[in-house]
């Protein structure tokens, strides 16, 4: 605005002052304009004679000048930050969607971009902002799905550990029952064999004694020798020992029968469950399950090997043609949860379903406790 321009230097007022006629000047400019006799000087604009000592500082105008200078400084700084066209040294105002470049006025009218899809930078930014929002929404959807996948994986790992734990319990129950029966048989064998062993030992000692007798004594008359010699009689097996042996055999037969029923029931139930489990599988899913089935015996062997601290009693990996049906490792993670959980068409959940291992463990405990 011309109100802040000094009429003498034609620049922004520096320390603006006002004289009696009402005109404004820079303090330095008005003091150097010269003075007449008796302390008077003439206004450079209206030629009015005014006293030099009537010059006064215009504070309102000085504040206005400071604000204008601050505003100009910010505009200059912002212009310096904005990139300019390296070819024409002009600011960018347009965006070419075909080339993906910023354009100045000159570039916009050039033949290189005359026929291109060009719009103002602000308009292009709004369009891309809408695309960014769509991408953000898609990203949020992907994140939600990723969280669901992680949740399924966590549930799969949890169910896998539960299955391993329960089948280890099954193995432990069978191992304890086996040790109990074997300890009974070993004890009965030692109790029954010890009297007979003592009898044989005494008989051998008696024969050795007769063998070492002198010839005269050995050739004594047959009848007196027969009357004097007492043959040892075998010790009969105690009735209590026979009863305990019979009880052990009965216990073994009972457990064998129950285990056979349990095995038949387990195999029949497994076939039904496999039919339901693989019903919706496609060829790729079946291939994945087949690969997992071939790898599971080796995986189980390595897991057992690591749990024993690097020691194993087997001479090598188990039979790779094992009949065990594993849970798919890489084909469909959701199948692991659905395997023994989707009974009534509902989703699998570790809270409202039991693992197969838990069910089998309970059934085996019930069978052995009958």
Image (cartoon, grey):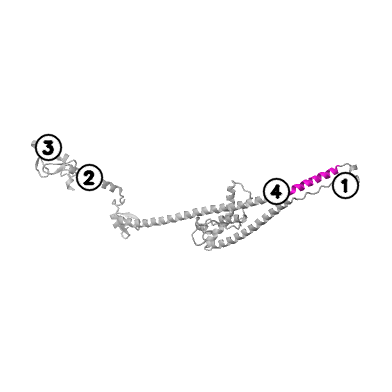
For disc 3, the marked residue is 53
Which residues, given as a range, are shown in magenta? 185-212
Q: Which of the marked residues, 2 or 1, is nearer the chain's N terminus?
A: 2
Q: How far apart are the two marked residues, 1 and 3, measured between alpha carbons?
A: 173 Å
Q: CA distance from mark 4 to mark 2?
A: 110 Å
Instruction: Specify the principal SS of the magenta part.
Output: helix
Task: Indicate which disc, 4 or 3, sits on the residue closer to the N terminus.
Answer: 3
Alpha-carbon span between mark 2 and mark 3: 28 Å
Task: Kindly report which numbered mark, 2 or 1, lies closer to the viewer in this rendering.
Answer: 1
Relative image position of residue 171 (x, y in whole percent): 61, 52
Decide which of tag 4 and tag 2 comes sooner along the chain.
Answer: 2
- Measure how far apart labels 1 and 4 are at the Cα level: 39 Å
Q: Which residue does the image show at 67% across and 56% down from the upper left?
A: 253
Q: Earlier in the sequence, mark 2 or mark 3?
A: 3
Res. 77 visible in picture: yes
Judged from the image, the secondary structure of the residue bearing numbered disc 2 is: helix
| Foreground tag (4 vs 2) | 4
Name the disc covering residue 326, or none.
none
Q: Which mark is drawn over residue 187? A: 4
Q: How many marks?
A: 4
Tag shown at residue 67: 2
Q: Which residue is mark 1?
A: 227
Q: Which residue is found at the position 59% from the left and 49% from the top?
A: 305
Q: Does the residue at mark 1 contact the one at mark 4 (Cβ under 8 Å)?
A: no
Q: Counting other residues with Cα less than 10 Å from the Cα at mark 1, is it few (<14), some (14-19), or many (20 or more)? A: few
At mark 1, the secondary structure is helix
Q: Residues within 10 Å of mark 4 (few under 14, many from 20)?
A: few
Q: Secondary structure at mark 4?
A: helix
- Picture quadrant of residue 363: bottom right
């Amino acid at each position: 605005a011309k109100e802040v321009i000094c009429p003498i230097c034609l620049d922004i007022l520096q320390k603006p002052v006002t004289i009696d006629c009402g005109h404004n000047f820079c303090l330095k400019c008005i003091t150097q304009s010269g003075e007449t006799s008796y302390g008077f000087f003439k206004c450079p604009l209206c030629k009015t004679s005014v006293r030099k000592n009537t010059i006064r500082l215009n504070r309102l105008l000085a504040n206005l000048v400071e604000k204008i200078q601050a505003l100009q400084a910010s505009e200059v700084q912002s212009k310096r930050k904005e990139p300019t066209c390296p070819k024409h040294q002009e600011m960018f105002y347009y965006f070419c969607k075909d080339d993906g470049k910023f354009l100045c006025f000159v570039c916009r009218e050039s033949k290189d971009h005359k026929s291109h899809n060009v719009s103002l930078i602000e308009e292009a930014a709004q369009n891309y902002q809408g695309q960014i929002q769509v991408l953000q929404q898609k990203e949020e959807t992907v994140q939600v799905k990723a969280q669901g996948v992680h949740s399924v994986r966590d549930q799969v790992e949890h169910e896998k550990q539960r299955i391993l734990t329960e089948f280890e319990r099954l193995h432990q129950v069978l191992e304890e029952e086996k040790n109990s029966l074997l300890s009974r048989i070993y004890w009965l064998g030692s109790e029954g064999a010890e009297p007979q062993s003592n009898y044989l030992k005494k008989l051998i000692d008696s024969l050795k004694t007769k063998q070492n007798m002198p010839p005269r004594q050995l050739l004594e008359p047959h009848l007196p020798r027969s009357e004097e010699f007492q043959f040892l009689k075998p010790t009969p097996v105690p009735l209590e020992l026979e009863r305990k042996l019979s009880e052990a055999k009965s216990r073994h037969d009972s457990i064998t029968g129950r285990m056979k029923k349990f095995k038949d029931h387990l195999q029949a139930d497994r076939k039904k469950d496999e039919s339901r489990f693989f019903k919706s599988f496609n060829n790729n899913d079946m291939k994945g399950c087949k690969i997992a089935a071939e790898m599971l015996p080796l995986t189980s062997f390595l897991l057992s090997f690591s749990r024993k601290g690097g020691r194993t009693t087997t001479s090598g990996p188990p039979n790779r043609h094992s009949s065990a049906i594993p849970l798919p490792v890489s084909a469909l993670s959701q199948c692991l949860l659905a395997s023994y959980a989707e009974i009534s068409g509902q989703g699998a959940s570790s809270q409202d379903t039991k693992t197969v291992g838990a069910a089998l463990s309970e059934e085996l405990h019930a069978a052995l406790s009958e």
